[in-house]
Amino acid sequence: MACCGMTVAQAATLETLASEGPMRFGELGTRLGIAPSTLTRNLLRLEERGLVRRAPERADGRAFRAALTRAGEHAAADVMRQDLAFASSVIAGLPAGSRAAALDMLEGLLAAVRAATESCCPGAFDHLMSGIPRDGHAASRSTS
């Protein structure tokens, strides 16, 4: 699957590094919920495009940290803008009178997803949802 000129996993990698800052490969893989080999391939492709750089961990020479380059910061911002535009277009496609109810139902679904994933991947849901307003649809209620 591709999004914004890269795979969804690569886009998620950029967004994570943009919101969390440089991090060790192991932590990044855990946050993204992807296997180390997949993460390594993603980082290699992003590094080849000049979007990510890797540096050895000072405390452990066997470990590496991934960080965005300046071009990577711009690419991550583009991905985030496209994500927001996509979400806005989905909501705008709903009948005005049902937007608030749809968003309420989505919040319930997300709460169920959080509960289901917490046992296998503690904290992953909160990480993936960081930066998304908790009650971001309050304004849309007044216009629905």
Image: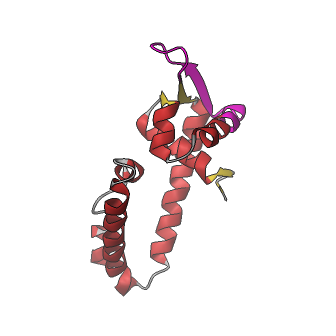
Left or right of 134 in this view: 29: right
Is residue 88 magenta-colored? no
Give above or below for 104 relative to 17: below
For residue 17, say whether it is visible.
no
At a point 53% along the width and 29% down the height, the residue shown is 67
- Residue most toward the front? 120
Q: Position of residue 128 (x, y in %)?
A: 42, 51
At a point 32% along the width and 69% down the height, the residue shown is 107
Q: Nearer the viewer, residue 83 or 92?
A: 83
At a point 36% along the width and 72% down the height, the residue shown is 106
To which quarter of the image does residue 82 belong? bottom right
- Numbered range of the magenta stretch: 44-63
- Residue most toward the right? 48
Give above or below for 142 relative to 83: below
- Say which quadrant the N terminus sits in: bottom right
Q: How is the image coloured?
A: secondary structure
Q: Position of residue 132 (x, y in %)?
A: 37, 55
Q: Position of residue 138 (x, y in %)?
A: 27, 68
